[in-house]
Structures are given as structure tokens and as C-alpha cells.
Image (cartoon, rainbow, N blue to C red):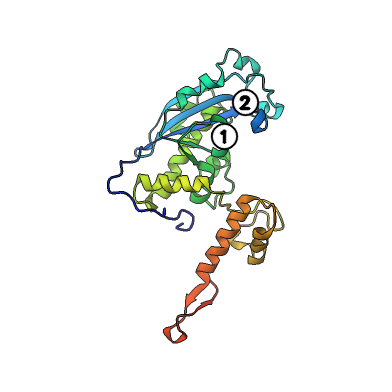
């Protein structure tokens, strides 16, 4: 696990303020278009207290799409109709109540962050779940609910009348996921501030994949993919950033595990042996 959630490379300040324990876990539903043509049509959030695990303060709102065309596929997924959006506030007004939080988290943080444009620390539960639960069958939100598994019964009152792919429903499920991630990874950290620093760094890096998503080794655990294929991934122009990042990680890890120091008679040279 240490290589999946490595220590932060910093020295904590003796005078640092305690890290805020509150994380606003947020989800958006959109028109389903490219970023420059997209529109947020629903926002939902809950607050997770990482020090106690309490989930509270549910908020949700529709947003006026401002003329953006809602993609039929997106509408089929979130099931938000034009009638439901009638009279909704413009995005600039709708987003204001969600803004005042020290940290945000979302299942695909780059997606929600680019559309909400809220400043502050952002955590990506998808990338963190890949570190906390690398052996899970799949790392989409509903897959994680099923395979981790996540117990949603205690938060059922918050989910009443909703379904997966509605903003508040997914925000609540993501908060339960982040709580489980913290339970898995926090013991490796000095304190909450250390956890948040590590989690933010992981969230800003490409995803450390558990399995390849393409090619002759599709679906195979990265730890079992041959070196020569990983080296090809790193060299290949235009390769998926997550795949390159993951290949470099495993090649470096194999180099570290394969290196064994010889006795002093060999002048401290290193040889490569199977890890």
C-alpha cells in the first residue's frame, strides 16, 4: 500500500493550523456536451466531516441551461426533463451556496471542477479509490457501491425520491465512498492534514490504473504486464496519460524491488534479481 499512497514530501510546520475536517462532496449533472458548449443543469452536495465521518447539510438545485441543448444520451441517464428545469435560477446564482467550503470532492473531480469553477482544494474519489481499493472489479461510482461494497442504508433518508445519476444521490454515495477511502488510507498518515495533502496530490496526478483499458493486455493487472510492453507504452507518442503514468510507476517499482545490494567484497555494487 505504501507505493499506492506514498508519504508527502514535506516537513509539517510546528505552527500550522489544524486542517479543516469538512469536505463538501459535490456532483453535477450537465447537458452532456463538450466543455465549451456544456451547461450545468443540476448541482447536489453534502458535507463530510472527516474527523467524525458525519454526513450532513444536503443541498441541491436545478440550473437554467441558458439555451444549451441537452444531449439525448445525457437526458436518458439523469432523466432530468425540461419541465423540471422550468423556472430554475441561472448557474451563476445557483452555484453560490455551494462555494463556501475549504475542500471539495467529486467522483471525477476534473469534470465537476471544470464546470463549477469553485476555487479551493479538490479531491478526486475515483483516483483515490484506485489507490485504496486497487483489487475492486471496477472503479465507477456504482461499481464501487457494489464491489467495495458501500453501505448506503444509513444515508437512505438523504436519497429518498432520487436515483443514481441525480446530483444529490451521487454526491451522497460519493461521500460514503470518501469516508471509506479515508478509513483505508488515513492510518498511513500522520494526521488529517497529511491525509489531505497526499489525497490532493494524488487527485492532481494522472490516475494510477489497476488494469489496462486497451491493447493485448486489456483487463490484465498492471503488475502482471511484461516490462517490454510497459516500456512501449511510455515511448509511444500520444499515449493515454493515465496509462503512461501507470507504466512508469510499475517500471520504477520493479527496478526498486529488483535491486539487491551485494556484500562489501563486491564494492557495494547493485545487481538485478527477481523481486
Vertical arrangement, residue 62 with respect to residue 204, above or below:
above
Circle 2 SS class: loop
Vertical arrangement, residue 272 with respect to residue 252, above or below:
below
Q: Residues within 10 Å of mark 1 (few under 14, many from 20)?
A: few
In the orientation shown, which residue stands out farthest toward the bottom?
265
Mark 1 and mark 2 in contact? Answer it, CB < 8 Å: no
Asked if residue 218 can be seen in this view, the reply is: yes
* In-image side of 245 versus 119 (left or right): right
**Of 153 and 35, which appears nearest the observer?**
35
Numbered badge on residue 39: 2
Vertical arrangement, residue 161 with respect to residue 14, above or below:
above
Measuring from the top left, give residue 274's x and y in whole percent: 55, 73
| Label 1 to label 2: alpha-carbon separation | 11 Å
Vertical arrangement, residue 11 with respect to residue 35, above or below:
below
Q: Which residue is mark 1?
A: 114
**Of 225 and 39, which appears nearest the observer?**
39
In the orientation shown, which residue stands out farthest toward the left?
15
Number of numbered tags placed on the structure image: 2
Asked if residue 183 can be seen in this view, the reply is: no
Measuring from the top left, give residue 263's x and y in whole percent: 44, 83
Amino acid at each position: 500500500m505504501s507505493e499506492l499512497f506514498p508519504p508527502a514530501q514535506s516537513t509539517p510546520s510546528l505552527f500550522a493550523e489544524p486542517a479543516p475536517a469538512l469536505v463538501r462532496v459535490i456532483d453535477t449533472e450537465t447537458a452532456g456536451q463538450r466543455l465549451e458548449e456544456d451547461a450545468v443543469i443540476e448541482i447536489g452536495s453534502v458535507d463530510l466531516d472527516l474527523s467524525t465521518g458525519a454526513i450532513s447539510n444536503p443541498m441541491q438545485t436545478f440550473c437554467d441551461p441558458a439555451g444549451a441543448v441537452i444531449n439525448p444520451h445525457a437526458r436518458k441517464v439523469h432523466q432530468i426533463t425540461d419541465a423540471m428545469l422550468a423556472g430554475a435560477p441561472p448557474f451563476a446564482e445557483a452555484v453560490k451556496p455551494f462555494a463556501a467550503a475549504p475542500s471539495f470532492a467529486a467522483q471525477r473531480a476534473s469534470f465537476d471542477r471544470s464546470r463549477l469553477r469553485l476555487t479551493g482544494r479538490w479531491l478526486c474519489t475515483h483516483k483515490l479509490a484506485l489507490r485504496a481499493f486497487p483489487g475492486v472489479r471496477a472503479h465507477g461510482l456504482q461499481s464501487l457501491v457494489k464491489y467495495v461494497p458501500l453501505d448506503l442504508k444509513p444515508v437512505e433518508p438523504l436519497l429518498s425520491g432520487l436515483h443514481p445519476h441525480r446530483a444529490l444521490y451521487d454526491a451522497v454515495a460519493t461521500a460514503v465512498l470518501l469516508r471509506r477511502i479515508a478509513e483505508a488510507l488515513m492510518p498511513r498518515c500522520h494526521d488529517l492534514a497529511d491525509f489531505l495533502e497526499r489525497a490532493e496530490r494524488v487527485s492532481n496526478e494522472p490516475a494510477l490504473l489497476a488494469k489496462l483499458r486497451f491493447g493485448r493486455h486489456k483487463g490484465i493487472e498492471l503488475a502482471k504486464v511484461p516490462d517490454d510492453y510497459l516500456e512501449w507504452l511510455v515511448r509511444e507518442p500520444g499515449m493515454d496519460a493515465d496509462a503512461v503514468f501507470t507504466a512508469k510507476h510499475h517500471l520504477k517499482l520493479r527496478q526498486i524491488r529488483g535491486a539487491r545490494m551485494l556484500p562489501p567484497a563486491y564494492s557495494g555494487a547493485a545487481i538485478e534479481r527477481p523481486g
